[in-house]
Amino acid sequence: MSRTFFITGGAGFIGSAVIRELIHNTDNHVVNVDKLTYAGNLESLVSVAGSERYTFVQADICDAPAMQQLFEQHQPDVVMHLAAESHVDRSIDGPAEFIQTNIVGTAVLLEAARAYWKNLQQQDADKAEAFRFHHISTDEVYGDLEGTDDLFTETTPYAPSSPYSASKASSDHLVRAWQRTYGLPTLVTNCSNNYGPYHFPEKLIPLMILNALAGKPLPVYGDGQQIRDWLYVEDHARALIKVATEGDVGETYNIGGHNEQTNLHVVETICEILDELVPYKVNGNSHHLPLTAHDSHKQLITFVTDRPGHDVRYAIDASKIERELGWKPEETFETGLRKTVEWYLANKTWWKRVQDGSYQGQRLGSL
Ligand code: NAD
């Protein structure tokens, strides 16, 4: 049965992976609702842009009349809410936008979904019964696991540390309240760090790949011993679609990759893959001029002052989604990271246009 997915934030890193999966591998329809902030890039959606099952609408989730109108116009079966401000460092420099989009925007979207769903209950009871609102969130809401071997489960108390994670925690609470108070059929997922193709180069893994290729320093916060669980973005996209279509209403599912790594290990592994795929030239004709033959990209690693409030360890127990919905990541850290490095090597036009800002030209609606 073909369904209409209303995806907010579909021009972002994870949203675009979800849309590519839905258009390439299912017969569902997608309405991508995205404001196109600096993080939105329609060039990540070139492969689906020509599909009759794909529609893009540039809109702000904080704009209540626009959201109401879009629900009425597109009559979605499933909402997947990914639109957010998502970069922790930006939330420390300027939290206001995070409060606005992540908290206010989620409330606006919930109200638009509730009005639409209430209407559906009068007009099409079966469609109302099957309607789902899936909120996509982060494991950062659970805070820091420093000094323990614990894993985050779905019942771990919330203890967010940064303005970003606090705003996501607030939005999770709103979604659960709308389910409990109004009966809106919601689901929540909390996921670990994602990585993979089309990742905006301010985030750790693409930043390190592109700096290393340019022979620039690889800035590692503090001593680099912060531990994160890494999940390949396409594995996350498949998990999200499973939860949205097969998950139980009112439930929360943690999603993770069983890949706990220190940040330093991640950066060193990227260097090792690059040493193999883009070796230094022995004749001194190196693409990284300050270095000499036989050097490793690891020499570019530079330790910088730690981020304030930096959580030391996150780790996810993803056994519920595995047990109840039969989802498992397909990529290991080694296969996923290699694929990611290879993707950046093969897709220079995509990231060069991000780096020089020309990707923002697509705001004019050319794609
Ligand atoms: P992203 O920053 O790459 O993309 C966010 C998208 O939302 C962009 O396309 C942006 O234009 C859009 N957007 C921002 N404000 C908007 C607004 N007011 N109205 C409409 N669109 C708006 O983020 P991402 O990494 O793809 O993350 C997507 C979601 O998944 C976020 O909610 C994030 O909290 C969550 N998440 C991310 C990770 C991760 O590792 N990246 C891990 C777990 C959860």
Image (spheres, rainbow, N blue to C red):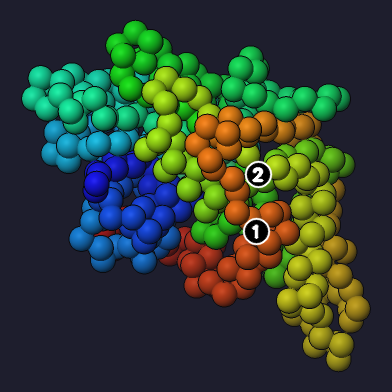
Q: Quadrant of residue 305?
A: top right
Q: Where is residue 359 drawn, in percent x and y?
A: 42, 62
Q: Residue at x 50, y 43 (%)?
A: 239
- Residue 258 in the image: state x and y as whole percent: 70, 42
How many numbered badges does the structure rendering display?
2
Q: Could you tell whether 33 is left or right of 349 in the image?
A: left
103 sits to left or right of 299:
left
Among the two numbered marks 2 and 1 on one chain, the one whose residue lies closer to the N terminus: 2
Task: Identify the residue at horizontal 65%, vertical 58% (top origin).
Answer: 336
Would residue 304 appear left or right of 63 to someone viewing this image? right
Quadrant location, the C terminus: bottom left
Can you identify the residue that label 1 sits on? 336
Binning the other alpha carbons within 10 Å of mark 1 as few (below 14), some (14 to 19) or many (20 upward) gives many
Residue designated by label 2: 257
Q: Position of residue 108 (x, y in %)?
A: 31, 23
Q: Amino acid at mark 1?
A: Gly
Question: What is the residue that sits farthest to the bottom in this orientation?
Answer: 283
Relative image position of residue 72 (x, y in whole percent): 14, 33
Furthest residue to the left?
123
Q: Residue at x 53, y 21 (%)?
A: 169
Q: Residue at x 73, y 66 (%)?
A: 212
Say whether residue 194 is visible: no
